[in-house]
Amino acid sequence: MAAGARALLLARRHRLLPALLLLLAAALLFPGAGAFKIAIRSVDNITVLIKPGPSTQAERFCKMCSGRTCFSERKIQSGGQFDFNFECSMPENYWVLVVERHIDCMSRHCPFEDVLLHPSGLPNLNRTFIWDVKAGRKDALVLKFATQLRQIESGDTCPDRVVYKIGSRFVTNTVNIGFFCRNGSVSRVKVQGEVIMTLELPWDAKLNTSGFKIESRDSIKRLCIIESTFLSESSVTLMSANYPLGFPEDELMTWQFVVPPTLRASVFFLNYTKPNCERKEQRLEYFLPGYDKPEVYSLKDTQPMNIPGAFNLSLQGCDQDDMKPEALRLLFRVDVHYPKNEENISFTVDLRNKYKKEDMNVTIYSNTVQSGSPACFICRSARHCGPNVTLTSGDSYSITILCRKKDVSSNVKIIVERAIACFRSRDCQDRVFALVVPKNLLDLPIPFDMLIWKVTAPEDTNIELRAPTLKLQEHLPKLQYGCTTSYSYTINGTTPSKMITFGTYCPGGAIEKIQIRNNITISLKAYGHRFNESVRDQDLKLVFVPAMKEDCIFTVTPAPKSKVYLQTPNWVDGLPSYMNVYWNISVPPKNIAQLRFLSDRMNVRCDKAWGYVHVKEQRPNAEENLRRHDESLPRALDMRHNFWVNISNCFPYPGSRLSMQFSVTVAGKKSDLAIIVGVVAGVLAVLTVIGLAVGCIKKKKKKENPQTPMVGVYNTNVNTQLPTKPGVFKKGRKNNESHVYAVIDETMVYGHLLDNMSGPGNAEIGVYQPFTGAVSSRPPSPPPISSFRKMSKLPEAEDSSTPMTDSETYTFAHQVLEPLKSNGDTHVSGNGEVDTSLKKELENSVL
């Protein structure tokens, strides 16, 4: 019995085997068939709807049943579950799935992450996923796509049948931003307000993720922003929102195009309609690289072409006329291509390491062409491309320069700004800063243009510039004393109450130091191709030193047999009121320096106080030469020792300014002595001729009239009057006859030239012995400013008949200085020296 039962069972099994094989083959061939289970968690906030597709034969040919109950459609809510099966082999031909998820981004718990395809385990039907993301009306959600999108018109299909649809909802109005396929250029879409995101997937799509994420929340104050990123040459088509139905009234949308710096973009309008505006106007704006303001175009204009770098395009709608409506529509194409006939260079600017802690900015800028647009574009990324770019210290940058022609070196320059600040004097006094151009900037493939040091110091600290080796020469082109070097320095005062220009200087002069009581900027300007080589030898240094009462001191060290021109600061506008400037001028050993002012007077009209020129040698008991602004300046002064030149300004009348220039010429003493000997020999020869002439005249007159008394010769350059008290000769010697003599013996007039002479060619000349003792390095004090300010008007010069003798000299200690008056007889300089006009006339006659 048992064996028979086993045989019967095996036979039954063998009979069922073909049926089992048929069921397995059907399962493999018709994967849509079978049993399914959809379970949704309550926290997912998801609704799944299974409904018939476009075909109306679903209930007839492919029923959806759960047990013995069949459904025409079924909706599963969050927290629900549904077990079902399809009674056909290909349910995807009859049924579709709609999965809708609600996301709340109005609170702080907005999921900024990749959006997943929930729930899992869905049957392979054509699926539509809808994400309804709520946000505030002023907020915009940023959607970022892993595979960039390509916009298509409504009704078009995508090759893989994967379609994205993006919409926006304001209260009850829904606006379609656009339809998109995968594999395009749209990388981000920013939508203001509530976002309706839709993804349509075919039944055989093998996608586990949605392909986008909610990246962030932003404020854009417009309907949407579509970002389109290009990685290589390509062409894309884009369209306005709600196309072709019409752009919403009074809305604004923007396209942001991110173009690599090595490519160019051109815009072409394919189709558009202009709205019939009742209020406002439709507006089309481009924000192009190289322009500070948006460029406005009309729909019918030729749109921009060959755009380098990133740019924006904005479309603004208007309020349309309801009686004659005409919607705004725009369909356009953007072609991105490689440039033609252009030069592109790329390099790295490394501002790390030693520059990390320094306050330094590097600006790379382009010149402009005749149209006003930049000749080149400088890009540090695809998003930052324009006529200039500024780099800060502490980082490394990759720079690409795009020029329309092959002229990068002539159209692109570098400007560097560095800050040197002293906040506490004890921390920075006597600290030396080398004012040099960083070597890595000199090695860049574009020329260096300018470096600006911004220097600030506290009240008890001054700024000193030192050029001990190269020294500095002031740029004075009007005197044909201009700089011809490959770079120069311009020094400007930046203290608000002292905004002045101290001058432009270049290496190779006589100015060794400049000490300034002011915050300043020092601008190094490069000229020509020789700059990179010559600037490597620069030795300009900056030192913070203890404060001084003088406004500015120049230390000048002329070389032997040289000539130096100098001028007061702020030449164009004139020296500021009450400002004192000093020049500490060294005289080389065994040399004489001749100081000569290039004008006869100070040429300033003073409203309050006086202006002065002070000259004083740096030796004990040195005589001081002082001239007031209304007095004549000395023609030339010979200096055998180091000396000071001080120019002090008054409070000028409006429109009057104090600007002075002077020169210092250095010559050897031996050459001067040779000139003096030659002059004396010439004088003796002239005297011999005069003596013979006088003797002949005497003899002739004796023959003609022996009784006639002899007439004396009067020398106007000899002071024969003794010092007297004021008021004794009120008429003055030129108005009386006290100086008339009947006879003057020639030996009394010229006898001092004949002393110790055995012959006309053996005159002994005294040699000047220079002072070798200690001298003061501090500048002489000018007349007190307090006396300047007490005077509202200049006093009239008083007439005085009192002559000045050699023993009387001006000193800087005088409180009130009277102008020197001539008595008509003898001319005396401010340092007490007698004018040697006769000597010069004799020299000229000999020459």
Image: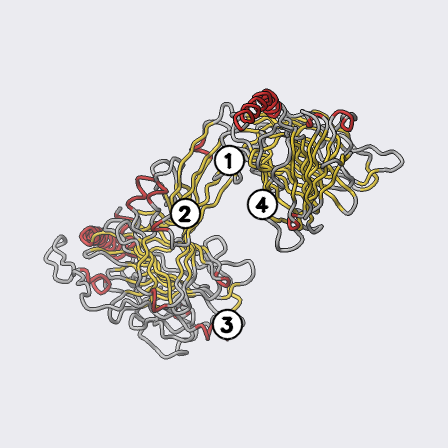
Label whose residue precedes the other's in the sequence (3 or 2) = 2
Q: Secondary structure at mark 4?
A: strand
Q: Is residue 201 visible?
A: yes
Q: Is residue 264 left or right of residue 91?
A: left
Q: CA distance from mark 2 to mark 1?
A: 21 Å
Q: Give the label on residue 795, or none.
A: 3
Label whose residue precedes the other's in the sequence (4 or 3) = 4
Label whose residue precedes the other's in the sequence (1 or 4) = 4
Are dots 4 and 3 in contact, CB under 8 Å?
Answer: no
Nearest to the eye among marks 3 and 2: give it: 2
Residue 720 in picture, x, y percent from top left: 30, 69
Residue position for label 4: 215
Q: Give the label on residue 395, or none.
A: 2
Label whose residue precedes the other's in the sequence (2 or 1) = 1
Frontmost residue, 457 versus 41: 41
Q: Is residue 22 left or right of residue 279?
A: left
Residue position for label 1: 377
